[in-house]
Amino acid sequence: MVDCGEGTQMQLRRSRIRFTKLSAVFISHLHGDHCFGLIGMISTFGLLGRTAKLTVYAPAELEPMLQEQIRMFCRGLEYEVVFHSIDTTRQQVIYEDHSLTVETIPLEHRMPCCGFLFREKPTQPHIKRDMIDFYHIPISQINNIKAGADWTTEEGEYIPNSRLVGPADPPRSYAYCSDTRYMPTLYESLRGVTALYHESTYADDNLQRAEKYCHSTARQAAMVARDAGAGLLILGHYSSRYEDEDVLLKEAKEVFENTRLSDEQMIFDL
C-alpha cells in the first residue's frame, strides 16, 4: 500500500481487498491526507485477529508518534508492526522480495517527502508447450529449460533452448510521485517507467499557487512523463477548486497524450 489517508480501511472493504493481503505500507510524507488512516487500519487489523507482521516504511519522524498511538489505542495487539525509517533525500532500494524492488524517489514539498518506484524483476521465458509435447520432454525438466538448458532426445537429436521457449514478459514498473513541486530533472529517475502517477493539484490558471505550496500542475506532470518516456501517466491529488477535473486532463494531454485521470477504486491494467 502506498500512503494511508483517512478512511483507508473503509476503502479496502469497498474494494473487496482482503486485509490479510496487505504486508507493507509506504508513507511518502507526514501530511494528514497521506497518513491519518494508518492507526485506524492497524487497530482494525488487530480486532480482526491478524497475526502476520505489518511493515511500515516512512520518514523517521512518524515512528515515535505511531508507537505512542499503538500504545494508547491498540493495547494487546497480537501482531508485530515493524517500522523502517526512510531517507527522503536519497534514491535507494528500501524493499525487495522475490518478484520486485521498491526504491525511494526524492521529491520537493513543504516537508520531507519522497515517491516510490516499484520495479518488477525479470521473469523466466515462456515454455512452448507444443514443443515440449512434441519432443516428449518430461515435466521434471521444465524448470531447467526455463533456466536456459537445451535438450537432447533419446535418438541423440540436439534441441537448442531457443526452440523450446518464447521471450519472457518485459518487466513492468510503476512510479508514485506524491506531493511535489515541478522538478525539471525528476524524469532522470523515472526513465522508461511503465506507468507514472504524478500529482496534478492545479491547472495552469493556478501556477503561482502551485509554486507557493510546492505542488504541480497537470501540464508539469505531463512534462515529467514525456521526458521520462513513460508508457502511461495517471493524474491525481486534485484541488477541490476544480469541480470538473477534465480541465486537468486536457492540459496534460496537450503535452503527453496517454494520460488518464485517477478516481476512487479505479483499476489500471499494466
Image (cartoon, rainbow, N blue to C red):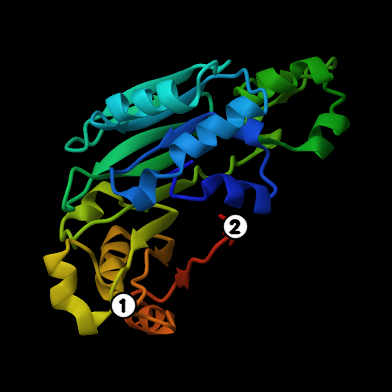
N-term mark: 1 or 2: 1
Q: Separation of disc 1 and disc 2 at Cα?
A: 22 Å
Give x and y (percent) for residue 198.
34, 60
**Drawn side of residue 267 relative to residue 87, left or right:** right
Asked whether, in this view, residue 28 is left or right of residue 266, the answer is left
Quadrant position of residue 48: top right
**Tag 2's secondary structure?**
loop
- Residue beneath label 2, please? 269
Relative depth, front residue between 213 and 121: 213
**Which secondary structure, mark 1?**
loop
Q: Circle 1: is it few (<14), some (14-19), or many (20+) Cα within 10 Å?
A: some
Name the residue nearer the viewer: 139 or 64. Answer: 64
- The reply to whether discs 1 and 2 touch (Cβ–Cβ < 8 Å) is no
Q: Residue at x 39, y 57 (%)?
A: 196
Would you place residue 156 above or below residue 129 in this image?
A: above
The residue singled out by tag 1 in the image is 255
The 10 Å Cα crowd at callout 2, few under 14, some 14 to 19, many 20 or more, is few
Q: Residue 131 at x, y = what percent?
A: 80, 35
Residue 124 in view (yes/no): no
User: Tag on residue 221?
Assistant: none
Residue 152 image point, x, y percent: 75, 18
Horizontal and vertical percent position of residue 33: 37, 53
Which residue is at a point 24% across and 55% down the rendered structure image? 187
Residue at coordinates 41% horizontally, 29% vertically from top-left?
56
Residue found at x 22% / y 85%: 205
Residue 170 appears left or right of 195: right
Given the image, on which type of amino acid does mark 1 rest? Val
Can see residue 61? yes
Residue 184 vertical placement versus 20 (above, below): below
Amino acid at pointer 2: Asp
- Looking at the rendering, in which quadrant would you find the C terminus? bottom right
